[in-house]
Image (tube, grey):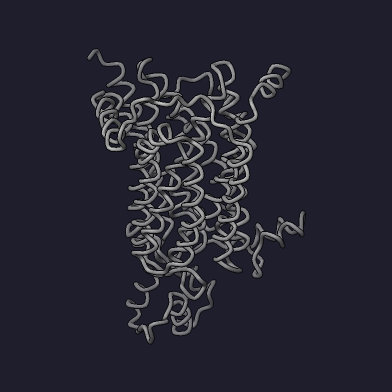
Amino acid sequence: MAGIGSTIRSFPKVFWVSNTMELFERWAWYGFYMAFALYLVNSSDTGALGFTSAQKGVIMGTGSMLLYFLPLFTGAIADRVGYKKILILSYAMYVSGYWMVATFNTFTLVFAAYIYLAVAGALFKPIISAMISKTTTKETASIGFGIFYMMINIGGFLGPFIAGAIYQKSWDWVFYISMITISINYIFVFFFFKEPGREECEDKESLGHVFLQALINIWITIKNFKYVLFLIIMVAFWTAFNQLYYAFPVFVDDWVDTSSFYNALHSVWPWLAEAIGTEDGTVTAVTIGSFDAFFIIIFQIWISGLVMKYKPLNAMMSGIFVLAIGVGMMFAFQNIWFILIGILTFSIGEMASSPKFTEYVGSIAPPDKKALYMGTSFLPIAVGHQLAGFVSGDMYDKAAGKLYLLKQEVAKRGLEITDVSDTFTKNDYWNKAMELTGMTDAELTNFIWVNYNPSKIWMVYSGIAIGAVVALFLYDKLILKSKS
């Protein structure tokens, strides 16, 4: 412990400044992001946008794909222009981007605003990782990146936990809090951030040359067939993983009664239950989703200790298999307690597999191309986001979309519900169906659950993750151990 303490004390001030900025950036981002799917698809009379699941999938999938693809270029731009200047630009884009998403209400404008936000994130993302790398040594990197990962998850917990408590009162405040939180980083970047070790180039390359070099770097790595095959397999993992943000909040909001969790929490900590709960005595889907990061904060060190003795590929296979069980439980039940166990299982799988992904890429990269390989390791995350948008769009709607399934039942009964005005909302349709069927909200929800089995969507998401496990097993046995 004395060794850990001395290592922590050895980190320079800018290391802690960088980590603090990461915490606030993740707080702002995940507070918005975990709620974003609901904001896009929930009924417009709640202050949300009332888009279709397909529109949600296109917006989130495309924007998030760019968020992870663009750092291949923005990292090089930051090295050339300077970290502080890019951070100031990124924060300005974040603040204005959150405002635009909150203000715009058409598909095209919201789509454009989210891509704008993704560019802000892509400017920020490579800088802090580089700062952690620059302010740690070979001996201190493990602890340094462990602290960095902890900061990510503290922000990833606080943001959604708070957003979940306020979005039913006002969607605007979800975005205002993200704007305020990211703005706090201006204090750190102006007064405490000092950029270390950036060398000025005498020969300034054009941005076009920087972009061209990034494309050349991608081409260099994709010529490695084994590496590319591994990245393609990992696309499936990230596709399943991202349903935590794309489909899970919508599923819980539509189908799950969280009142028993609220009541249990209220019996122990009434003040907490009342602070984060709704007026109906429930806990929102966004707050429930924040427990993934909460479990990681608690258990990451323990799980890392368990898997550190295993080969990265074996740890990844085991972790993704556990994650597949967790994601299945998250979508298979209406019982909130089973769902919370599913989130815990999901987070254990995430803790075992996600860090090992980075470790594996670093271990197989040629010594002179480690940075290059680490940069291209974002590619499967980017593609996974795009595919996650697709399988949480029309595919999700037809299997588990509450309004989609209700419309099937309305048609089957020969009932007629028409849009009587331009302001006719999703909630108006649901309320009219309740009136025509003579059912209460809970009765109609349970009727559709029993007769249309929306929980079957778990097989799609778990199946994608299991497919990644099988593919990794075959990759290990047939590709890595082949004589070619």
The front one of 89 and 55 is 89
Position of residue 375 in the picture relative to residue 292 (left or right): left
Work out which residue is located at the far front of the displayed protein and give it. 202
Q: Percent from the top left, x then y, of residue 306?
A: 57, 24
User: Residue at 43% of width from left, 26% of height from top?
Assistant: 200
Tell me the quadrant of the picture where the N terminus can be found: top right
Q: Percent from the top left, x then y, of residue 64?
A: 39, 48
The front one of 50 and 262 is 50
User: Residue at 37% of width from left, 57% of height from top?
Assistant: 59
User: Residue at 37% of width from left, 69% of height from top?
Assistant: 106
User: Residue at 42% of width from left, 82% of height from top?
Assistant: 423
Position of residue 98 in the picture relative to residue 412 (left or right): right
Tell me the quadrant of the picture where the C terminus can be found: top left
- Tell me, yes or no, if residue 341 can be seen here: no
Give the quadrant of residue 220: top left
The front one of 211 and 338 is 211
Say if 315 sits above or below 93 in the image: above
Say if 210 sits above or below 280 in the image: above
Work out which residue is located at the far top of the displayed protein and give it. 483
The front one of 215 and 239 is 215
Say if 476 sits above or below 26 in the image: above
Q: Percent from the top left, x then y, of residue 231?
A: 33, 32
- Tell me, yes or no, if residue 326 can be seen here: yes
